[in-house]
Amino acid sequence: MLKDEVVVFLTEKQSDLVHHFRNDSWLLKLFYLSDVLENLNKLNLFLQGENTNVFTLKSKIEAFIKKLNIWKQKVENDSFEMFSSTEDFLANNDAESNVIKPLVIDHLSNLLKQFQK
């Protein structure tokens, strides 16, 4: 896993940041942000694509808003399946989903508000 390589690199450089990569709570947040940003990047790339018009753009944004609502509902039900890195981390470590669940719900709620504007 790339995490281990980052720990080795930061340890060799005697960086103060290495302790973050040994903290499951911090890593869980990092994996969640990685998953969300991956989805936002996909949306961004589509919105910049060729042969788009206001109707397809509006439709894509409305679909993304629906996804955010579904994701929020799934997280409320303790499912992180749509966030693959987060789900893998939870499955392979002793991290508890209740550590990140309120943060994810809050973040998704805020994203929803911003997209609805």
Image: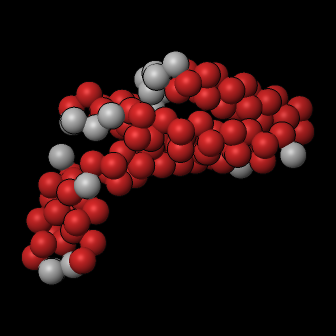
Where is residue 65 shown, x and y percent of the image? Answer: 74, 32
Can you tell which quarter of the image residue 96 is in? Answer: top left
Instruction: Please indicate whether residue 25 sits to the left or right of residue 113 in the image.
Output: left
User: Quick check: 78 above or below 37?
Assistant: above
Where is residue 21 shown, x and y percent of the image? Answer: 24, 59
Where is residue 102 shown, x and y percent of the image? Answer: 53, 39
Instruction: Please indicate whether residue 90 sits to the left or right of residue 38 in the image.
Output: left
Q: Is residue 43 visible?
A: no
Coloring scheme used: secondary structure
Where is residue 92 shown, x and y percent of the image? Answer: 21, 32
Q: Is residue 32 visible?
A: yes
Can you tell which quarter of the image residue 83 is in? Answer: top left
Residue displayed at 49% across by 35% down: 101
Q: Out of 14 and 34, give the one closest to the viewer.
A: 14
Can you tell which quarter of the image residue 71 is in? Answer: top right
Residue displayed at 83% across by 40% down: 116
Instruction: Please indicate whether residue 67 sits to the left or right of residue 1 in the image.
Output: right
Q: Out of 44 and 84, give the one closest to the viewer.
A: 84
User: Quick check: 77 above or below 117?
Assistant: above
The number of numbered discs placed on residues in the rendered structure image is: 0
User: Quick check: 5 above or below 98?
Assistant: below
Residue displayed at 52% across by 26% down: 75
Residue displayed at 61% across by 22% down: 73
